[in-house]
Amino acid sequence: MQIHKTDVVIIGAGPVGLFAVFECGMLKLQCHVVDTLDAVGGQCVALYPEKPIYDIPAYPQIMAAELIEKLQAQAAPFSPTYHLNQRVDRLQPLADAAGWQVVTSNGTQIEARAVIIAAGAGAFGPNRPPLDGIEGYEVASGGNPAPVQYFVKQREAFRGKRLVIAGGGDSAVDWALSLAPIAAQVSLVHRRPKFRAAPESVRQLEELCASGKIDLVVPYQLAGLEGDGQRLSAVVVEDLDGGRRSLPADHLLPFFGLSMELGPIADWGLGLTRHHVAVEAVTGRTNLPAVFAVGDIAHYEGKLKLILTGFAEAAAAAHAIHPLVYPDTPLHFEYSTSRGVPVS
């Protein structure tokens, strides 16, 4: 099997991982990028591609999928190699102690002088409600979208549909507000009258409920599904006294948060703090030589979990890696306006 050789392996192709490609490229560091998903973008693409982001500098508002497109285009001049739909299973030091070998779940082997872990919060998946037969409704059939979906990837797919949204946090409330104008009917189910969402979102929700555009179903919880096992006709809900209601529905959107786990990362000997990797704040260095962590997975005192924080961390890690790859070449700091970028 071919062994790939590169300067830096980046684990994670989310927004921070993609920007790390750019920052490394500006310092003439070649990168290979590994991600468990089948496309770049991390949670921005897998979970909320059509959700607006408001705290990216110079963009008053940008959709998550568009942000990923721009980051990928920004990284493209540096010709990164992407290894998608595979997980990094092993991280082992090279025999000459001059770097690391990364081995993925499909057997890909990459040798690099340094590693940047930009894996967000690790592997993620939805917390599924324990409803009998729900698996059959999670599959799209006959060209129609799956009746049960845990992430909204295309808002227009729900136009004219009867929707039951379950949950009490920001995701449930935000999508109820977003889908109410285009859906035929929206029922929002929560086990208590109070929601754990932004106050302004709750205020808007109350207005839409008062006008009849959203049916607020509280205090209820999901109790069952009605349909033929593949096509949904109704969602059964139950109150605290066992009383049941049947809500007509074409789709159920349960928003009960994500199940996060570090996976094999937890076994690499890294210093961990509450399922995060402890790093030096200035450089992103971990306790392992030439291994860095940036973005949401990295932890240090005062850390802010923002995409823009991860961008700055990616730049700092790239500069810390340069002397490892080019030990005899002093790094003269230059702004991008002076250095420029290659033409892709």
Image: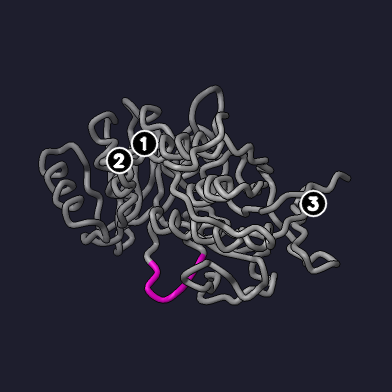
Horizontal arrangement in the rendering, residue 142 relative to residue 308 (left or right) = right
Q: Magenta segment: does it hold 299? A: yes
Distance between the alpha carbons at the discs numbered 2 and 3: 38 Å
Q: Earlier in the sequence, mark 2 or mark 3?
A: 2
Q: Which mark is residue 109?
A: 3
Q: Quadrant of the N terminus?
A: top right
Secondary structure category for the residue under label 3: strand
Q: In which quadrant is the C terminus drawn?
A: top right
N-terminal of the pair, mark 1 or mark 2, is 2
Q: CA distance from mark 1 to mark 3?
A: 47 Å
**Number of other residues with Cα within 10 Å of mark 3, as a class: few under 14, some 14 to 19, many 20 or more:** some
- Marks 1 & 2, CB-CB < 8 Å contact: no
Viewer-nearest residue: 287 or 77 = 77
In percent of width and height, residue 18 lies at 53, 46
Q: Position of residue 264 (x, y in %)?
A: 68, 64
Q: Main secondary structure of the magenta part?
A: loop
Colour basis:
one colour
95 vs 196, left or right, is: right
Q: What residue do we see at 21% from left, 61% from top? A: 194
Foreground mark, 1 or 3, reads: 3
Give the amino acid at mark 2.
Answer: Tyr
Q: How would you rate the neighbour count of disc 1 (Cα within 10 Å): few for under 14, some for 14-19, many for 20 or more?
A: many
Q: Which residues are magenta?
A: 298-303
Q: Residues within 10 Å of mark 2 (few under 14, many from 20)?
A: few
Residue tagged 1:
249
Local SS, label 2: loop
Q: How many marks?
A: 3
Report the residue that reaches farthest toward the right: 1
- Image-quadrant location for residue 151: top left
Tell me the residue that label 2 is attached to: 59
